Structure formats: structure tokens, C-alpha cells
Image (tube, rainbow, N blue to C red):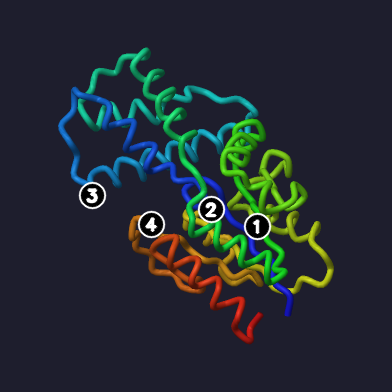
Amino acid sequence: MTVAIFFDVDDTLLDNYTAFKETLFTLSSIEPLPEEQMQELYKNFRLYSEHIYKQYHKTRFINNINARWQWVAKNLNMENDPSLLEDLDDLYHRNQQKQKLSKDFVDLFSFLTENEVYFGVLTNGLVKAQAKKIKQLNLSNYMPSKQIFISENLNDAKPNFSCFEKVEQTLPKNIDSWIYVGDSFTNDIEPLLNSHWLPIWLNRFNEQVTQDGYVEVKGEEEAVMTLRKLIHSEKF
């Protein structure tokens, strides 16, 4: 069997959570937050971000990009000042741009290349924004551009299964097994349940779900180890 592996970008290959924490750490007006509270803040921040993108995908218009920061400000009893929200968003993006591809994933990509495993990226988002992240992570050092898919270019988006099907249609005909690694259960894992894709859930925040039909990993190291084992197993 010949396998193709695709990865999500945000919160999978790119550590947005660290950027979020660094942004809030700069605010002297708030008390230091326990890790559990910080994670809950970020998970809701991410939900707002996904909602903003879904609205754009439907209307081709972004309305109130700072709604996600309004929620954070309200939760932390901060002043809901538009200029502060803009500053937060700008600082978040600057912190985000400092994040690099982890050594675990660098080593994994080298391993996949050495073993002639077909791999690439499928990410939701706007072409301009996601292309910057792809460049920032130096993904072109590991895979050709034809193996990098951004939802806006596909005129589709996860969690639509059609988004994965459009990627399939571009792959070499000898590929007969597909793996997807992502962090969002709703966008990355749920649409692949009961399909011919094997979803691997990078569950960074130990979220609880009742469904099955996927492989769960808690961090990058475990994700890499799991993929290495799958490649070496008889299944692939």
C-alpha cells in the first residue's frame, strides 16, 4: 500500500498558542493566569477565529476581525477599547511570526522524504495569510508547492469532506491510503470519521469527545512517533 500524509498548519505545524500567551503576558494590567484558564481563553479565541473565517468563506467579506479580542477583553475585565484591540491583534501576529517549525516535525519530514512517503499540507484560510505562514515555517524546504493546499484556492474549506476529495484528485494514482494530522476535532477529524482517510487528532488541550474512529496523540513527539510506527507497519 502507498500512503499520503497531509498536515494542518495552525495549531498543528504552527504554534499559535505560544503566540497567544506571549501576547497576553505583555499586558501588565492583568494578573498572571493559570495554565488551565489560559488554555480555555485560547480555545474560545480559536473558535471565534474559525467563525470569522467561515463567515468570510460564505460572504467573501471579513466583518469585525477584532471580535475574538473583544471576547478576550470581556473575559479578563479589560477595557473594550478599539485601539487596544487593534494593538492586541497586531502584537499577536508579530508573536505568531516568530514561531518556527519544531525539531520534531523537521525530523519527521526528513524521515518521510528518506522513506519516499508522499506528504503535504491542507490548511483552511486566506491565501495571502496562509502563504506567509507556509513561508515562515520553510515548508518549501520539505515539500513542493503542488503538495501544499490552501482552502481559498480550492474554493472549499474544512470540515467539508469535499475539501479532502479535491486534494485526493491531485495525487499520484498509486496512492491508496490517506492520513490527515490536525488539531481541530470539528474541522480536521470529524469529517474523516467513517471515511477511507485515517485522522490523527493532535489533542493539545486534552479535550474530551465521545466518538471514535481516529488516532489520538497529545503532543508533537507522540504524533511523530505514531506516524513513524504507521509507516513501518504492515498496514502501509
Circle 1 sits on which residue? 161
Circle 3 sits on which residue? 36
Circle 2 sits on which residue? 187
Q: Position of residue 137 (x, y in %)?
A: 57, 43
Residue visible at 24% across and 18% down in the picture: 79
Q: Position of residue 175 (x, y in %)?
A: 77, 71
Judge depth for marks 2 and 3 and give the one in front: 3
Q: Disc 2 vs disc 3: Cβ atoms closer than 8 Å? A: no
- Whichever of callouts 1 and 2 sits on the residue coming sooner in the sequence is 1
- Whichever of callouts 3 and 1 sits on the residue coming sooner in the sequence is 3
- Whichever of callouts 2 and 4 sits on the residue coming sooner in the sequence is 2
Which amino acid type corresponds to the residue marked 2 in the rendered image? Asn
Mark 1 residue element: helix
Residue 163 vs residue 104, the one in the foreground: 104
Mark 2 residue element: helix
Residue 140 vs residue 45, the one in the foreground: 140
Q: Quadrant of residue 152?
A: top right
Mark 3 residue element: helix
Residue 67 vs residue 20, the one in the foreground: 20
C-alpha distance separating marks 2 and 3: 23 Å
Q: Position of residue 226 (x, y in %)?
A: 50, 72
Circle 2 Cα neighbour tier, 10 Å, few/some/many (<14 / 14–19 / ≥20): some
Which amino acid type corresponds to the residue marked 3 in the rendered image? Glu
C-alpha distance separating marks 1 and 2: 10 Å
Q: Is 104 placed left or right of 76 in the picture?
A: right
Q: Is 171 placed left or right of 63 in the picture?
A: right
